[in-house]
Image (cartoon, grey):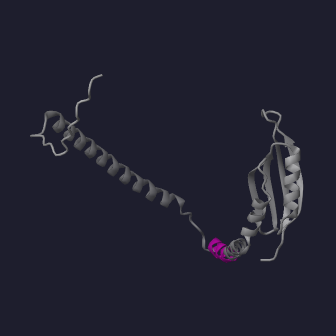
Amino acid sequence: MSRLRPLRLDFAARHDGASLGRIVLLLVGAAAMAIATTAFQDIRTRTAQLESEFGRIKKPAVTARNAGAAGAQRPDEAVRRANAVARELARRWDKVFAAIEAAGDPEVGLLAVEPDAQKGVVRITAQSKSKQAMLRYLTRLQDKEPLQRMLLEQHQVRVDEPERPVRFIVSGEWEQAQ
């Protein structure tokens, strides 16, 4: 067996002068940066031109008669939207999602949860390994507060997939107390 020679590392080594390859690489980099900067400036200028043209095209000519009618409708609509958003934010979503999570089953995977705050309804799309797992999950959901009247809307055995999972939709209400 031969013995390994010691490895000597010189971290403070100095190179004298710049080689031709380094100078060429520096010049190529500087040229590429100049080209990229010029292209960027051209794109910014063209974007500004297009935005100003778009702004001119988008502003419709509104007659005084239409302006009065539209102005009267817009505040009412804005107030309705603001109230709807306020109701959505005031709803206690955390209890609904905690109940759905607590009813979880290792054989059931959630695909979508669609709560509707105005109606107080939640719709859950899920997939299970078997019909028995689907029914166990539905039973657990029915026992969780604040969920009420959780019902199976539809189910379908996915025969096109190898394990033949069951995709189903469950919907129900939740307590309106906030």
**Magenta segment: does it hold 5?**
no
Q: Is residue 113 shown left or right of residue 33?
A: right
How far from the left and from the top, in percent, is residue 54? 49, 56
User: Could you say where residue 60 lies in the image, as x and y percent from the top left?
Assistant: 56, 63
Q: Which residues are magenta?
A: 65-76
Residue that sits furthest to the left in the current view: 16
Which quadrant of the figure contains the N terminus?
A: top left
Q: Is residue 24 above or below residue 74?
A: above
**Quadrant of the rendered image containing residue 176:** bottom right
Compare residues 122 and 110 and report the one nearer the observer.
110
Measured from the top left, where is residue 164 in percent x and y?
82, 36
Question: Which is more toward the observer, 2 or 64?
Answer: 2
The spot of residue 43 in percent (x, y) is: 37, 49
Residue 132 shown left or right of residue 8 in the figure: right
Q: Nearer the viewer, residue 95 or 107?
A: 107
The reply to whether the magenta stretch includes residue 72 is yes
Image quadrant in which the C terminus is located: bottom right
Q: Residue at x 49, y 60 (%)?
A: 55
Q: Is residue 52 left or right of residue 166?
A: left
Residue that extends furthest to the top in the rendered view of this protein? 1
Q: Is residue 63 above or below residue 30?
A: below
Residue most extreme to the front: 1
- Give the answer, above or below, for where 41 lies relative to 174: above
Magenta stretch: dominant SS?
helix
**Count the marks: how many?**
0
